[in-house]
Image: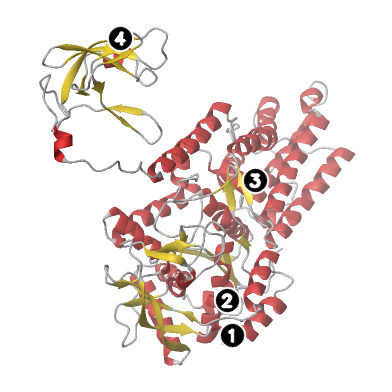
């Protein structure tokens, strides 16, 4: 069981950027793992503060706002509310979900900065940074794009190349361009406040690589080691930025500057705890300053350096705060063999999933945990989602609980039967039952949630196998007492299963609790074979999981493919402009609105339709290569546009007396050019 030296727990999950919806990569990275851990701690009866909040000061937010023509505050308001609701609907059980635009957060972050500033911990330095002369402002890293010097990607950002994953600085880019104006930025001197990370090298090496060498995950230790043991060592890092969106730097001479988002954001955990404690009327400080509090940060691997090096250096310098006991970071989750990308809309969005699968939160929690990227990048596929639901949740977990409850109602009027004499098979089942909770707990405490979930499913398999081996549907024919013993044990396995499954499958556990009228039970009760009192009534079986059909997952895959296609079209480069012409050239074209009187396929042609049109000057015949895009009956009676003074051209023995004008999408699909409202046939276009 969890180490008893800690009286309370502060558990944080990475603050999501409030510039877009949540997706399954976020869930698998830190929100499901942290929720599992917290639910387990609560089941043990531990005192827990589980906090998070929206990160609302990132550069990505200002880019989003500029793109949409709205204010950054409007952007963060929209996504904060959406994410907060999605977390609640999905069952992520935060004690408090805050936001970094709150007054408490601004005061907390400013206070921490001033504390370090007054201690002389910052280096005040003037450096050259890129400046957009047309926009009249310094450019944050994400406002600069250029060619990656390492892989040649022409769309690398000023801080990172998303193609090869390299960390960059803006001056590393080849041919840098401002995302504000498209111009080449110039280097201009500006003053900022830097945290001298090199001063913390010895402390960080000892704390991470010595004290935590045996209990932190290898991926976390490896990334920290690469920073701490790099040839040039840790470098001073600016804690301020030239921007107008964020927390103003609270010192003289810092006008027009805000706190760097990675100074500001982790402090959001502290301010969220402050708000929660104030609502409860308790003191927040023990959750961040007491040595008997265990602090754990759940994050994705892209946040390791900030949570293991920069934030601890800030807390250490302040001097009053505890440091994290663990930082269990997960790797990345891919989708259908491709990297999840919000910019390419290649994602399964949580709010859409909840709309389309309103009763299947636990299915997604199960699949993302069973396939969690704990030690390496993993892949989510809809086929795997379907398979795990049908072959594991339905066929094993749900089938066992359903059979135990249905047979009890059928043979014992829904009352827990008496436990009689035990056979060897009964004793083995009970002994195995007793061992599972500690086995599952040990994996949870080592942050091995995939492993822990596999033991939960083995627990369900125990129940299924026990019923299959004892066959109560046969023993009822001549030994009701024996049947009662079997179902008593099966029901108690199911009751235990509900307790240990709750951290992973909270909605499912709640249904089982409802069936068995279980209240006030926790992990301390798990492992007992007499949780359910003999003679109590249980409720009829509730459907825990249902089969997912092929057409359901096919629709989701098709949705992804269509999204990918639309994104590619939106970002496709338009055809280059043709040679310039004069107005006199244009004036020679006689374009009119005409009405299609008849349309029919041309024999022996897959592409041509023969149209007769009323031009206002008489009827003309036109052969148009649109048969693969329009049915003849869809054109009859429509007004379209036509070049009527094009010299006739004989095609397949027919004189075509003009050209119907079309627009061709980037995917090759033709669109009719039609007047916005009905107009007279023969009306000219000019």
Q: Disc 2 to disc 4, how far (Cα)?
A: 78 Å
Residue 505 is at least partly visible in this image: no
Residue 576: name its quadrant.
top left
Comes first in the chain, label 2 or label 3: 2
Secondary element at tag 1: helix
Quadrant of residue 305 within the rendered picture: bottom right
Q: Disc 2 or disc 4, which is closer to the eye?
A: 4
Task: Please determine whether, in this image, residue 15 is positioned above or below residue 103.
Answer: above
Query: What residue is disc 2 on?
Result: 309
Q: Secondary structure at mark 3?
A: helix
Q: How is the image coloured?
A: secondary structure
Query: Measured from the top left, where is residue 499 in percent x and y?
Result: 65, 49
Q: Which residue is mark 1?
A: 200
Residue occupying image coordinates x 53% and y 43%: 361
Query: Is residue 83 toward the left or the right of residue 499 in the image?
Result: left
Residue 413 image position (x, y, % from top left): 65, 28
**Which residue is label 4 attached to?**
654
Of labels 3 and 1, earlier in sequence is 1
Q: Does 458 sit left or right of 95 as displayed?
A: right
Asked if the residues shown at circle 2 and circle 1 are in contact, with their CB atoms under 8 angstroms apart, the answer is: yes
Q: CA distance from mark 2 to mark 3?
A: 39 Å
Residue situated in front as seen by the camera: 304 or 357: 304
Upstream in sequence: badge 2 or badge 4: 2
């Amino acid at each position: 069981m969890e180490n008893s030296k800690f009286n309370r727990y502060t558990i944080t999950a990475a603050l999501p950027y409030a510039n877009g919806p949540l997706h399954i990569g976020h869930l698998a990275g830190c929100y499901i793992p942290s929720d599992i851990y917290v639910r387990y701690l609560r089941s043990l009866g531990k005192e827990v503060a589980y906090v998070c909040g929206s990160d609302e000061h990132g550069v990505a937010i200002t880019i989003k706002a500029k793109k949409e023509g709205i204010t950054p505050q409007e952007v963060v308001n929209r996504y904060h509310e959406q994410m907060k609701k999605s977390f609640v609907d999905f069952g992520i059980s935060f004690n408090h979900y805050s936001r970094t635009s709150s007054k408490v957060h601004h005061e907390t972050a400013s206070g921490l900065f001033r504390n370090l500033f007054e201690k002389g911990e910052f280096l005040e330095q003037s450096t050259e940074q890129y400046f957009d002369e047309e926009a009249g402002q310094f450019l944050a890293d994400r406002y600069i794009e250029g060619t990656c010097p390492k892989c040649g990607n022409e769309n690398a950002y000023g801080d990172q190349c998303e193609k090869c994953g390299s960390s960059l600085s803006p001056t590393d880019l080849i041919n840098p361009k401002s995302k504000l104006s498209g111009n080449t930025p110039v280097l201009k001197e500006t003053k900022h406040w830097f945290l001298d990370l090199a001063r913390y090298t010895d402390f960080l090496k000892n704390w991470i690589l010595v004290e935590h060498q045996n209990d932190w995950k290898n991926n976390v230790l490896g990334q920290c080691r690469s920073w701490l043991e790099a040839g040039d060592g840790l470098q001073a890092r600016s804690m301020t930025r030239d921007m107008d969106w964020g927390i103003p730097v609270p010192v003289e001479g810092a006008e027009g500057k805000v706190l760097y988002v990675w100074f500001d954001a982790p402090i959001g955990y502290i301010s969220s705890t402050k708000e929660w404690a104030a609502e409860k009327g308790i003191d927040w400080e023990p959750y961040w300053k007491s040595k008997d509090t265990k602090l754990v940060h759940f994050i994705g691997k892209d946040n390791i350096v900030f949570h293991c090096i920069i934030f601890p250096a800030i807390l250490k310098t302040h001097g009053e705060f505890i440091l994290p006991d663990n930082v269990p970071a997960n790797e990345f989750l891919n989708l259908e063999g491709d990297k999840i990308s919000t910019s390419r809309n290649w994602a399964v969005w949580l709010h859409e999933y909840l709309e389309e699968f309103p009763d299947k939160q636990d299915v997604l929690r199960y699949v993302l945990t069973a396939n969690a990227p704990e030690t390496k990048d993993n892949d989510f596929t809809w086929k795997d989602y379907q398979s795990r639901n049908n072959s594991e949740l339905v066929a094993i977990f749900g089938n066992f609980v359903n059979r135990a409850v249905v047979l009890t109602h059928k043979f014992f009027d829904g009352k827990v039967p008496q436990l009689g004499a035990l056979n060897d098979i009964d004793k083995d089942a009970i002994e195995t039952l007793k061992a599972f909770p500690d086995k599952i707990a040990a994996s949870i405490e080592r942050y091995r949630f995939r492993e822990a979930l596999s033991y939960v499913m083995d627990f369900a398999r125990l129940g299924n196998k026990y019923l299959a081996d004892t066959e109560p549907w046969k023993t009822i024919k001549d030994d009701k007492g024996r049947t009662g013993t079997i179902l008593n044990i099966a029901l108690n396995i199911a009751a235990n299963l509900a307790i240990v499954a709750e951290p992973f499958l909270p909605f499912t556990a709640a249904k089982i609790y409802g069936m068995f009228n279980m209240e006030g039970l926790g992990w301390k009760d798990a492992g007992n074979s007499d949780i359910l009192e003999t003679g109590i009534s249980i409720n009829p079986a509730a459907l825990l999981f249902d089969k997912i059909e092929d057409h359901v997952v096919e629709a989701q895959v098709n949705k992804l493919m269509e999204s990918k296609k639309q994104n590619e079209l939106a970002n496709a480069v338009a055809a280059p402009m043709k040679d310039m012409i004069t107005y006199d050239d244009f004036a020679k074209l006689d374009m009119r609105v005409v009405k299609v009187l008849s349309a029919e396929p041309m024999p022996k042609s897959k592409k041509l339709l023969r149209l007769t049109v009323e031009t206002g000057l008489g009827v003309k015949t036109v052969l148009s290569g649109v048969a693969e895009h329009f049915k003849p009956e869809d054109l009859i009676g429509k007004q379209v546009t036509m070049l009527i003074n094009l010299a006739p051209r004989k095609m397949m023995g027919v004189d075509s007396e003009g050209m119907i004008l079309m627009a061709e999408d980037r995917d090759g699909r033709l669109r009719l050019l039609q007047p916005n409202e009905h107009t007279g046939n023969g009306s000219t276009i000019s």
